[in-house]
Image: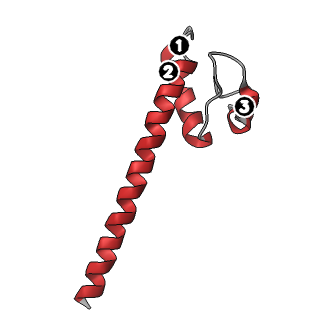
Amino acid sequence: MKTSLLILVLVALVLSSSFIHSTEAVFSYCGSKCEARCAKAGVQDRCLKYCGICCAECKCVPSGTYGNKYECACYRDKKNSKGKPKCP
């Protein structure tokens, strides 16, 4: 009984640590991509915020500082509550 519980706990720890590493990788990827995307934005903090949200959900950011949204359909198709593009 105790050994099966110990094995279960060890498996849970291994799985959770791999999830944490993959989450950190997404954030570091998104951070650098969004910094490049928002480099020329007039309101950088807002651009970085929404770019980060879109990147985390879509796992991609179009190249350049404007346009090129065809490179990432998910990023391109996200809309805000008013029906306008959500992602910068």
Residue closer to the observer: 67 or 42: 67
Residue farthest bottom in this picture: 1
State the separation of the CA atoms marked 1 and 2.
Answer: 6 Å
Return the x and y of residue 71 as percentages of the image width and height. 72, 31
Q: Which structural element holds mark 2?
A: helix
Whole-number angstrom distance, CA of label 3 to CA of label 2: 17 Å
User: Which of the two discs, 1 and 3, sits closer to the camera?
Assistant: 3
Looking at the picture, which amino acid does disc 1 mark?
Ala
Residue 28 vertical position relative to residue 68 in the rendered view, above or below: below
Q: Which residue is mark 3?
A: 71
As measured in the structure, the alpha-carbon distance from the residue carrying label 1 to the one carrying label 3 is: 19 Å
Percent of width and height locating residue 81: 69, 32
Q: Amino acid at mark 3?
A: Glu
Task: Please state which amino acid type lies under the numbered disc 2.
Answer: Glu
Give the quarter of the figure containing the C terminus: top right
The mark nearer the N terminus, 3 or 2, is 2
Q: Is residue 1 left or right of residue 66?
A: left
Q: Which mark is residue 39?
A: 1
Tell me, yes or no, whether the two marked residues, 1 and 2, touch with CB atoms within 8 Å: yes
Disc 3 crowd, CA 10 A, few/some/many (<14, 14-19, 20+): few
Q: Which residue is mark 2?
A: 35
Question: Is residue 83 visible in the rendered structure shown here?
Answer: no
Image colouring: secondary structure
Q: Secondary structure at mark 3?
A: helix
Image-based side of 2 in relation to 74, left or right: left
The answer to whether any part of residue 6 appears in the image is yes
Q: Residue at x 74, y 36 (%)?
A: 73
| Circle count | 3
Q: Is residue 9 above or below residue 50?
A: below
